[in-house]
Amino acid sequence: MKEAETPPEVWERISEAGIRVLRIPTPFQVGRVNTYLLEDEPLTLIDSGPNSGKALDELERQLEALGHGIEDLELLIITHQHIDHLGLVDIVAKRSGAEVAALDKLAPFVENFGADAERDDEEAAALMLRHGISEEVVRALRQVTGSFRAWGSKAHVTRPLHDGEPLELRDRRLEVQHRPGHSPSDTVFWDADRRILIAADHLIKHISSNPLISRPLDGSAERTQALVTYLESLKRTRELPADIVLAGHGEPVTDHVALIDERFRLHQRRAEKLYRLILEEPRTGHELAQSLWGDVAVTQAFLTLSEVIGHVDLLVNSGHVRETDDGKVLRYEATADTSVDQLGDLIPGGNPAVERG
Ligand SMILES: [Zn+2]
């Protein structure tokens, strides 16, 4: 989908709010990451880009174009745990002496970045094997994940933020709001006076945010239902009277209610599609991913599996599907021969006017 251009008056509002967008390159498919400079006191940078020389050069160059140096930064805020957002924080913090702020629940992850990586990998591998991905593919993917880790970095969080707390700057007050789902640590920053929400990857205009399966931040072993959690978070964001939502990638969102409703429909439809496949015959998560995405289910095995499991969670929670275990792999099967039309709204309270199509 081609992005509609953002009207100049929207950019004016953003600029009047003292917010500058710096687009920093990443080696990932998603392309550049948006970091936001708040020309305020303290001079604040929200997210920093991945840990690479190229990203650092670009950050420096774009700051200079606005009349600032890295050394001038006084506060760095981390929106969530993904490496395209936090990789440079440590380098920038060391060069500038800036404070580093992150959600309290995220702080230990940032401080110990990389230390739990091996455990993360083991759990992801076990999950993939349980859902029918071959050992060969799992082994190959572990190498890829391992090599990606260098784009991240640990950092020392000097200022833990609490959900609901106001973050006061000279010219603004930002309310810290935890909105887990895309990752367990997604944090958005709400400027109620200006009706601007800085949302990072919680809501992106041109792509639906992947509800990636992730280890809970509190270290518990239980798998969280990432999509279910994400949809709950979206409902809360839908309630905000925002005029502009600034995302971690792509253009600003100027009609978040319509966009969120579109996402609810997308997830409902995707769950219905999966249900249709499960109704035909019991299938593993990986078989379902292959039916929907073909070869991408192999090259992006964990991502597509996260998508499948997230949507099947909706079907399991509503009682239409159950998990069976043959001792080796898990399969999903329908609990009754309910037709797709009879599934109803799988996202309770998601949208009062879900269009079927
Ligand atoms: Zn992300």
Image: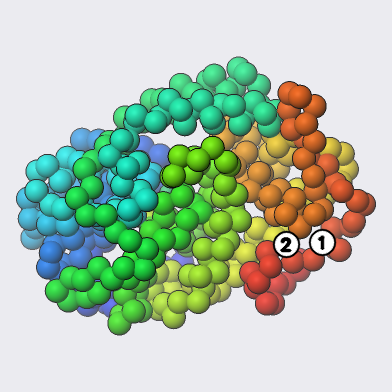
Q: Residue at x 39, y 31 (%)?
A: 116
Which image quadrant is residue 309 in? top right
Image location of residue 308, percent across then percent down = 66, 44
Q: Please say if 272 is above or below 212.
A: below
Image location of residue 82, percent across then percent down = 38, 44
Q: Please say if 110 is above or below 117.
A: below
| Kind of residue at badge 1 | Leu
- Contact between labelled residues 2 and 1, with CB atoms less than 8 Å apart: yes
Q: In this view of the protein, can residue 288 be seen by the observer?
A: yes
Image location of residue 136, percent across then percent down = 60, 17
Q: Residue at x 14, y 74 (%)?
A: 170
- Can you identify the residue that label 1 sits on? 343
**Mark 2 within 8 Å of ligand 1, using the beta carbon:** no
Quarter of the image that includes the C terminus: bottom right
- Can you identify the residue that label 2 sits on? 346
Quarter of the image that includes the N terminus: bottom right
Q: Residue at x 32, y 53 (%)?
A: 104
